[in-house]
């Protein structure tokens, strides 16, 4: 197979787009291309192409996955999307996710546990919004439901703690303060009945 071009990707720094026989074949890191002295080659055998696809690229995407995960925890979908944004082809990005799952570096259940704990502790977010957020990150509904069941706190407890932290030093009998508190809770996905109950409890505490 004749190497007809190895051009820098216009969107992905450090990645090359390889064309064989005038057709796009795959993308790979420029560092790997240089390390293997492929810039001196005019053609590749089918076996060499297979080796590049399944060995060199697999190693490259694995190394990049570890770098991304060292920066922050990610879901399977989040890692796959990040690898694709870095310039890897979808099939290579998917293979990288499988490798990270096998090594235990990516685990949607563990991610959901950490995410929910953080959201409930510091941001006073409703279970509804947490579910929507995790679903958007690609976590399966059954995983979200199972993990949420591990947390005993209900929306009322979470909302009450959040309002106390945010508005504890203000008078909730002041209409302006009450309006801000209602907006605060509604924005975090709490329903009308929960908001009304929380405001009533806080007013009773100050009487």
Image (spheres, rainbow, N blue to C red):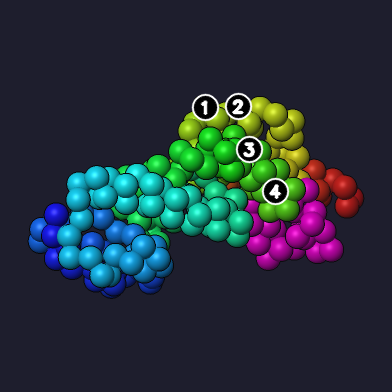
Q: Are marks 1 and 2 in contact (CB under 8 Å)?
A: yes
Q: Give the residue displayed 65% in from the left and 62% down from the top.
A: 180
Q: Secondary structure at mark 4?
A: helix
Read off the residue under disc 4: 118
Q: Earlier in the sequence, mark 1 or mark 4?
A: 4
Of tags 2 and 3, the one toward the viewer is 3
Q: Quadrant of residue 168?
A: bottom right
Observer-nearest of 100 and 152: 100
Q: Check residue 164 for magenta coloring.
A: yes
Q: Is residue 173 visible?
A: no
Locate residue 111 relative to residue 84 in the image: left or right: right
Q: Position of residue 116 (x, y in %)?
A: 65, 42
> Which residue is found at the position 20% from the left and 46% from the top?
46
Q: Residues within 10 Å of mark 4 (few under 14, many from 20)?
A: few
Q: Earlier in the sequence, mark 2 or mark 3?
A: 3
| Gap between marks 1 and 4 measured at Cα | 20 Å
The magenta region covers: 161-186
Marks 3 and 4, the one that precedes in the sequence:
3
Q: What percent of the width, then of the height, locates residue 25?
A: 20, 54
User: How far apart are the two marked residues, 3 and 4, measured between alpha carbons?
Assistant: 12 Å
Residue that mark 3 sits on: 110
Sequence-wise first label, 4 or 2:
4
Query: Is residue 1 shown left or right of residue 67?
Result: left
Mark 1 lies on a secondary structure that is: helix
Which one is in front, 94 or 46?
46
* Nearer to us: label 3 or label 1: 3
Q: CA distance from mark 3 to mark 1?
A: 14 Å
**Relative to 66, residue 146 above or below:** above
**Which label is found at residue 142?**
1
Check disc 2 and report the residue beneath it.
Answer: 146
């Amino acid at each position: 197979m004749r190497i007809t071009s190895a051009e820098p990707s216009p969107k992905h720094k450090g990645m090359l787009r390889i064309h064989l026989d005038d057709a796009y074949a795959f993308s790979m890191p420029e560092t790997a291309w240089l390390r293997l002295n492929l810039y001196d080659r005019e053609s590749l055998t089918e076996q060499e192409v297979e080796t590049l696809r399944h060995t060199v690229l697999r190693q490259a995407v694995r190394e990049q996955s570890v770098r991304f995960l060292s920066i922050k925890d990610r879901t399977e979908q989040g890692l796959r999307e990040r690898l694709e944004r870095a310039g890897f082809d979808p099939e290579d990005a998917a293979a990288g996710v499988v490798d990270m799952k096998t090594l235990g570096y990516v685990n949607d259940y563990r991610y959901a546990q950490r995410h929910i704990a953080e959201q409930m502790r510091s941001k006073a977010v409703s279970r509804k919004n947490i579910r929507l957020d995790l679903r958007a990150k690609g976590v399966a509904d059954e995983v979200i439901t199972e993990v949420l069941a591990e947390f005993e706190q209900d929306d009322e407890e979470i909302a009450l703690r959040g309002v106390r932290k945010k508005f504890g030093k203000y008078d909730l009998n002041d209409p302006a303060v009450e309006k801000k508190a209602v907006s605060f809770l509604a924005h975090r996905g709490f329903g009308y009945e929960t908001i009304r109950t929380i405001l009533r409890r806080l007013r009773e505490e100050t009487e």
